[in-house]
Amino acid sequence: MLYAEEKERENRFKLALRMGVPIFLLAGITVAGVLFQYFDTIPIQFFVIWIGVFAVMIYYLFYLIYQGFNERITDSITHTFNREYLIPLFKREIKRAPYTVILISIDNLHDINTRFGTKNGDRILFEVARRIGEYFEDRQMQKIPIGHFKGGDFFVGLRGDSNEYKTMMELICIKFENYSIDDIEVNISGAITDTTFSKNLDQLIDQLFDQQNEKRTVQYLIEENVPIKPDEIETSVINAVKNNSFVIRYQNVISGDETRIVDLSVKLKGENGKLIHQKNYIPVISRLGLLREFDTAIVEAIVNECCSIENNLLFSLNISPSTLRQQHFLNAMQVLFKNNEVAQHRIMFILSEREYYYRTDRFNTFIQAYRNMGILIALDNLGSYHSTMLYLKELTVDVIRIDTHFGKNITNKGYQGILRGLLVSIKFLGLKSWIRMIENEEAYDVASSLGIDYIQGNYLGKIAPLEEILKKEDSEIR
């Protein structure tokens, strides 16, 4: 038993004693009075019955107190429903009729706790929950279940189709724009789904968090994807990973006038040939614990591709940082690159991580092991995630890829000013710079004038099979 559990049990026992003492005294005084007055005439059965009643009373008192602790339905900080009560409630509602679930998140709760302290963080949670409740009450919507799920995430359940509430959810987010409590800025975002997507609550919750991640991370979608039901996608992802069933496309990355890097885009092949985009399969792979297996399969495929062509192109691919930090993956890569020496210095792992991994000394040891076997390492999203900036100070890598916002807005003077500062830091550290999302000639001219080492975007080449990129290179050389 944990120490906290022991203290909790001790605390409950003391509370039961404090609550029971008045009752026990009252019962004792009453019985004592009866005994003094009628002691000679009281039958022995009375004493037996009284002791039994007293024991039952003690047991029942302790039982009520313990059950009161176990059956708490509200969260002590936000005063909304806790997760243990909310989940069964939603499941019952989903069985009855169409149901909508809204996710409302405080995106910067971690920063608030860090900068202003956890007491202020708790106060922000309470205030946001209260004002969400007031929002619905102002619209004459009574008894709306609002629950604190985790961190800064709240769930709201509403009967009916999500189309009835999409505008309302957007208005909630607009209402909280530029919102602050006692000069503490609070950033709110929302997502919505309903039982037309799935009647499985776990899948609805995953869908809501996926929506939130999409909104927080700008993703570059190459083509529209055929929607796949959540029940189908899990089976399709498992089969695709197990059978190495994926489609790999490339986009050329220019240095000077030549293609130096081909950057990978990977989609999984689902049932009936449906392609599953990264934004759909990565959450499933992570949840099922298949991330290392998937990353290993992709690297093996690229090493084989690399060894099959007579070209000095560098192949770049995103690898999960958690995979990179696993000894099993490192061992597999050492064997793979030892057996395929041609691939050495022709593969680049790109890592991006939203949350900072504090054991950077251990992380750096792994990174240097990959670099020693001839794998280049690139840090992604510089200028977006604070973790990338921290890693830039503490990890020894080869290339820095700048966040896509700068590529999209490179002609903007404000973005150019920040970009120049980032490039000075990159060059001072002796690293190569890389920018994406260069979509027209003006943007390309600006990127070239800034001295960026690697430039990527649709203006310089669309995503295509490797054969097409190689043919284009051959024709340009001729």
Image (cartoon, helix red, strand yellow):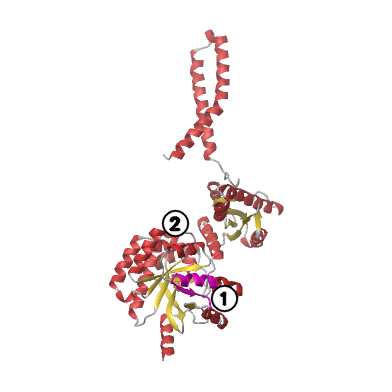
Q: At x 55% / y 41%, what residue is drawn?
A: 72
Q: CA distance from mark 1 to mark 2?
A: 32 Å
Q: At x 34% / y 60%, what residue is drawn?
A: 327
Q: Is residue 6 left or right of residue 192?
A: left
Tell me the kind of residue under disc 1. Answer: Ile
Q: Which stretch did the figure color magenta?
A: 419-439
Regarding residue 240, the answer to whether it shows in the image is: yes
103 above or below 29? below
Few, some or many C-alpha atoms within 10 Å of disc 1 (few <14, some 14-19, many ≥20)? many
Within the magenta stretch, is there residue 422? yes
Q: Position of residue 169 (x, y in %)?
A: 64, 60
Q: Nearer the viewer, residue 325 or 174?
A: 325
Q: Which residue is mark 2?
A: 358
Regarding residue 226, the answer to whether it shows in the image is: no
Q: Which residue is mark 1?
A: 410
477 above or below 216? below
Q: Position of residue 47 (x, y in %)?
A: 50, 16
Q: At x 44% / y 86%, what residue is drawn?
A: 472
Q: Is residue 172 left or right of residue 386?
A: right
**Of marks 1 and 2, which one's residue comes earlier in the chain?**
2
Which element is circle 2 on?
Answer: loop
